[in-house]
Image (spheres, grey):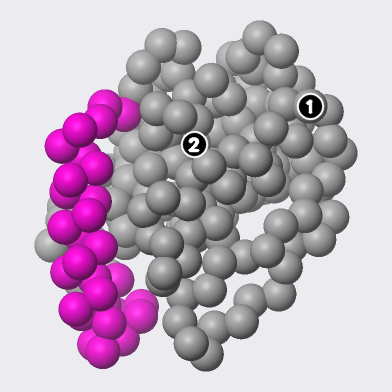
């Protein structure tokens, strides 16, 4: 699957005015997006942007203008590197900022809502990782701990609302539905 995705992505030209192919890997929390990005990234010599670096516990939904301003617009404008402060996901989570992240010919934007309408003018290709909701919840709680179950229930309700009002592929983006078994 990785080689087929690689070939398909490289066959696509970036959107007009961009010099970078930006690939969205979207899906529910716990779907396997990060795993797929980690597998696909090296085959494309791609740097990975994580939507979770722009979202935070205090701002889990409306973080996307910051990603546009601090990552997508600089990429569009020809920047060679990106620097930004990562969002905090709890009182004891104080992540280091990202400083000097290389902008590569292919960049991967990984995370929930990475193929959202507002990002589509920047995207060359979009992948939807299709994983059953219950499996996503199970993976998330296994990864983050049982004490996060309430947060996961709230996040899944937010995801449900997002999914109800959006589509995952729109011209000029091509979509590949990857199942959780492939990730």
Residue sitting nearer the eye, 132 or 114 = 114
Q: What is the spatial separation of the Cα atoms under label 2 and label 1, in whole angstroms?
A: 19 Å
Q: Earlier in the sequence, mark 2 or mark 1?
A: 2
Residue 27 among magenta residues: no
Left or right placement of residue 14 versus residue 98 in this view: left
Label 2: element kind: strand
Image height of 71 relative to 111, above or below:
above
Residue sitting nearer the eye, 18 or 125 = 18
Tell me where residue 113 sits by quadrant. Answer: top left
Q: In the rendered structure, which segment of residues is drawn in magenta?
A: 140-168
Which of the two discs, 2 and 1, sits closer to the camera? 1
Would you name the residue on which mark 2 appears?
24
Decide: few, some or many residues near mark 1? Use Cα within 10 Å; few <14, some 14-19, many ≥20.
Answer: few
Decide: few, some or many residues near mark 2? Use Cα within 10 Å; few <14, some 14-19, many ≥20.
Answer: many
Label 1: element kind: loop
Q: Look at 62% across and 14% down and name the residue there.
A: 15
Would you name the residue on which mark 1 appears?
77
Q: Look at 25% across and 74% down and name the residue there.
A: 151
Tell me where residue 148 sits by quadrant. Answer: bottom left
């Amino acid at each position: 699957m990785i080689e087929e995705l690689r070939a398909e992505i490289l066959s696509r030209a970036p959107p007009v005015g961009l010099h970078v192919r930006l690939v969205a890997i979207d899906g529910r929390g716990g779907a396997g997006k990060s795993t797929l990005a980690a597998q696909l990234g090296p085959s494309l010599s791609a740097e990975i942007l994580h939507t979770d670096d722009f979202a935070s516990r205090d701002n889990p939904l409306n973080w996307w203008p910051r990603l546009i301003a601090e990552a997508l617009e600089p990429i569009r404008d020809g920047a060679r590197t990106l620097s930004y402060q990562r969002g905090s996901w709890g009182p004891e989570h104080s992540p280091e900022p990202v400083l000097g992240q290389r902008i590569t010919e292919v960049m991967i934007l990984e995370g929930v809502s990475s193929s959202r309408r507002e990002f589509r003018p920047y995207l060359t290709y979009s992948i939807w990782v299709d994983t059953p909701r219950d499996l996503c919840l199970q993976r998330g709680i296994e990864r983050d701990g049982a004490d996060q179950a309430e947060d996961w229930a709230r996040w899944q309700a937010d995801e449900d609302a997002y999914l109800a009002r959006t589509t995952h592929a729109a011209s000029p983006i091509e979509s590949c539905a990857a199942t959780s078994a492939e990730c």
